[in-house]
Image (tube, helix red, strand yellow):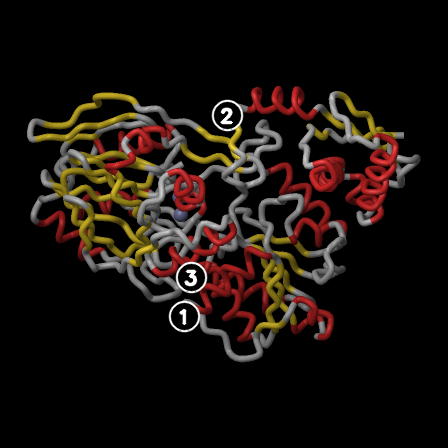
Amino acid sequence: MNCMAIRWGNDIVVVDAGLMFPESELLGVDIVVPDITYLLNNRDKVRGIVLTHGHEDHIGGLPWILSELNVPVFGTEFTLALVENKLEEHQLLDNADLREIRAGNRFNLGPFTINPIQVTHSLVDCVALAIHTPIGVVIHTGDFKVDPTPTDNRLFDLHTFAEYGKDRSVLALLQDSTNVERRGYTPSERAVRGKFDEIFARAERRIFISCFSSSIHRIKLAMEVAWEYRRKVALVGRSMTESTEIALDLGYMEVPEGTIIHPGQIRDYPPDQVCVLISGTQGEPMSALSRAAVENHKHAKIERGDTVVLSSRIIPGNEKAIYRMIDHLFRREADVLYEDGSSPPVHVSGHASQEELKLLINLVKPRYFIPIHGEYRQLRLHADMARSMHGAVGQVLLMESGDVMEFDELGARKIDKVPVGRVCIDSGSRGDVVEDLVIKDRRHLSEDGFVLPIIAINKLTGSVESIPEIVMRGFAAGNENGFIEEARKVIANTLDGSTSEEKMDYGVIKEKIRADVKRFIGKTTSRRPLIMPVILEI
Ligand SMILES: [Zn+2]
Ligand SMILES: [Zn+2]
């Protein structure tokens, strides 16, 4: 989860504070954040958290960590803007101590001098960190690729890396392993431009482009191309709107007056004059694109002949949800484009491939090399690659989460393991920590019981065949009969508000019912029973 502590004596700096989205088996858990027992046990020594960039897997754990340990947070302008939004949501902003850093401007933190170095990635305003310690410089690359033509023209600062290598002052290089399995070079963000041109030149109706809301380069390109092809741009989905607004505010994008329209105005323009940037590339059931795919979005209507572009990676584990959504888009008779290996690419990675990794290692020439940010196999392959680079790398060290590596004048050694692991959080609130899923379920059942809404759906038509049944165990709502009547109404409303395609997609409809019943029970009883909708096919 990208959270590393660097300690000299009685001073600790933390690099990044990420989160993980739960795997499907962690049902009912919203996010997973790092276990910070080590930091809490040393709370008087922690001088601050320094952020490399604003991706969720680097900043998403902040609300949880700051609520336990309120220390200064250092980040670049864009990164802090994302952090502010996040902390605001959790009512933590007022008490937070956020300090802006800039690439090339060194600052001191305890015994460390930290030099942020401009790097390129799929997001903007990203830095690597050169952390000067009394026994040498530790360089943490953060996430990066070497993009020679970033859309914001803020170049990867190869010179500074080279300078560190020149005087052989680098004790350790910690490098991003994500794409170590890919040969060659990762294409520039601008490589997508060719594909966008093809799409815009050909499309006769609306164009929907979905990408990660943090892909500022991608959003910027889409806006530029839309403007050139005289299309208005509507932003649909909260995350897409928020991150674009931040990028506009901070000057990372400039859009000619009148280009952006409100989603409600989409229908006011002819279909061939509109481009919709919409969130939800991973088929998340409640995202704007998933809802549009089943004809259940107020503003984003996808019709025959429209073009839908998924400009993102298919994240392993999400295939099923994504292809289900793509199926729905095909049913709308849309022309759907997604990453299929064709050229020019509809998506490019934000992480360095082998040749870029080697380039940086050659520039930095570290005494010790440590792969970070990858699955074990990637760390291992990255270590093997670095080992083969005699002359550029002293010794290669392989560490896993929780390992403690000690450096001194004599060398480096693994000395200890500290507690690490996942802390599961329900409904995104820092108060809702779930120690363990089993414990959570047991607690749920013993304290709040369970509620089973049972819905009979006709397999062929998608219509609901009878009044929903509600079975409850270990849960009492006071006025039992009135409560069941009300809960039935809630379910009936959910069903009424769903299209027949949604009703035939049991994953979607179950999740909608679960969310609505949960909200209703929370409001009327402030209890949280386990809710497991059951669909009976008739
Ligand atoms: Zn990352
Ligand atoms: Zn990243």
Position of 304 relative to 55 (above/below):
below
Q: Mark 3–mark 1 contact, CB under 8 Å? A: no
Q: Amino acid at mark 3?
A: Arg
Position of 517 relative to 159 (above/below):
above
The residue at 53%/60% (across/down) is 242
User: Depth check: 520 or 205 in front?
Assistant: 520
Q: Amino acid at mark 2?
A: Glu
Callout 3 secondary element: helix
Distance from disc 1 to disc 2, alpha carbons, whole Å, reads 42 Å
Give the farthest residue toward the right.
Answer: 466
The residue at 49%/63% (across/down) is 194
Distance from disc 3 to disc 2, alpha carbons, whole Å, reads 44 Å
The residue at 27%/60% (across/down) is 102
The residue at 15%/27% (across/down) is 412
Q: Which residue is mark 1?
A: 251
Sort mark 1 into few (<14), some (14-19) or many (20+) by Cα contacts within 10 Å.
few
Q: Which residue is mark 3?
A: 190
Q: Quadrant of the N terminus?
A: top left
Q: Which residue is mark 2?
A: 435
Whole-percent x, y for residue 151 in the image: 39, 64
Whole-percent x, y for residue 492 in the image: 85, 42
- In the visual, does 86 lie left or right of 105? right
Indicate which disc, 3 or 1, sits on the residue closer to the N terminus: 3
Between disc 3 and disc 2, the foreground one is 2
